[in-house]
Image: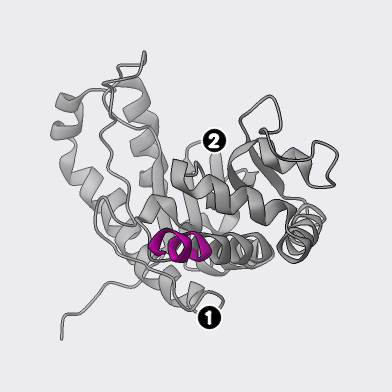
């Protein structure tokens, strides 16, 4: 049985690595500091993904936590093809735990973002694929699903988290602009989150429980979205 290293936190060297990367954003610099990247970013990130996945399974049994690049760990290289910003490397660590049967970025999940200035924790779907909009919008105004969404938003924002995803200027044609949930009809994605300064727990295993508490607070929105996404899968199959 393959042994795994326990998560003991993101050390100060992790933050130092990203501070230096910001000053020296180049593929050559990364290659010269590959050992630091492996030791202080990738090793703790893989351990965090494994142990956070175990904890998240207690509140989202179908969660997928896969400690590989392009799975739960976002690659450090940026896609600059369609961006005016041509810096080649991401100046933050991004991790993703998802739940559902669609491709990972089309599912709702839990997001972890670390950079020198702090962390961001979130849940949701950042941008809906085109074929998901009918189910999403119908759910927003559905007598039952819409009421559950409104309650979820109230629960989550009441604990100090923000919700976002507004994208369109107008309510789409065919929907009532006076509906109680009309603002969400203008969303291109739906997510909740919180931004915080680097917590005292960052460099210890206590970061796992720190994050789990916040993910649990945001769980009502994740559950609503996960259910909506699976309805979209069933509708697409018919």
**Which of 181 and 113 lies nearest the eye of the viewer?**
181
Pick whichever, 51 or 33, lies toward us.
51
N-term-proximal mark, 1 vs 2: 1
| Magenta stretch, main secondary structure class | helix
Q: Quadrant of the C terminus?
A: bottom left
| Element assignment for label 1 | loop
The residue wearing badge 1 is 58
Residue 210 seen from this side: no
Classify mark 2: helix, strand or loop: loop
Q: Is residue 188 visible?
A: yes
Residue denoted by label 2: 117
Q: Name the residue rendered at 27%, 58% in the picture.
A: 43
- What percent of the width, then of the height, locates residue 14? 37, 45
Label 1 environment density (alpha carbons within 10 Å; few <14, some 14–19, many ≥20): few
Q: Residue furthest bottom?
A: 1
Q: Is residue 231 magenta?
A: yes
Image-based side of 149 in relation to 17, left or right = right
Q: Which mark is in front, 1 or 2?
A: 1
The stretch in magenta equals 230-238
């Amino acid at each position: 049985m393959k042994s795994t290293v326990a998560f003991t936190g993101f050390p100060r060297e992790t933050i130092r690595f990203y501070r230096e990367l910001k000053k020296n954003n180049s593929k050559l610099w990364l290659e010269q500091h590959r050992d630091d990247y492996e030791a202080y970013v990738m090793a703790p990130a893989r351990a965090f993904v494994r142990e956070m996945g175990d904890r998240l399974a207690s509140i989202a049994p179908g969660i997928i936590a896969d400690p590989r690049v392009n799975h739960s760990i976002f690659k450090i290289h940026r896609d600059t093809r369609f961006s005016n910003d041509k810096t080649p490397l991401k100046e933050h660590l991004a991790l993703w735990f998802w739940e559902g049967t669609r491709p990972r970025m089309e599912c709702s999940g839990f997001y972890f973002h670390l950079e020198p200035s702090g962390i961001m924790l979130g849940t949701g779907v950042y941008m809906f694929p085109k074929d998901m909009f009918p189910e999403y919008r119908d759910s927003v105004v559905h007598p039952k699903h819409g009421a559950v969404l409104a309650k979820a938003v109230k629960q989550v924002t009441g604990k100090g988290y923000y919700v976002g995803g507004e994208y369109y200027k107008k309510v789409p044609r065919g929907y009532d602009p006076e509906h109680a949930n009309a603002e969400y009809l203008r969303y291109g994605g739906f997510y909740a989150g919180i931004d915080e300064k680097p917590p005292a727990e960052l460099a210890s295993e206590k970061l796992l429980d720190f994050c789990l508490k916040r993910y649990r607070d945001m769980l009502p929105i994740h559950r609503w979205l996960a259910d909506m996404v699976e309805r979209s899968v069933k509708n697409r199959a018919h």
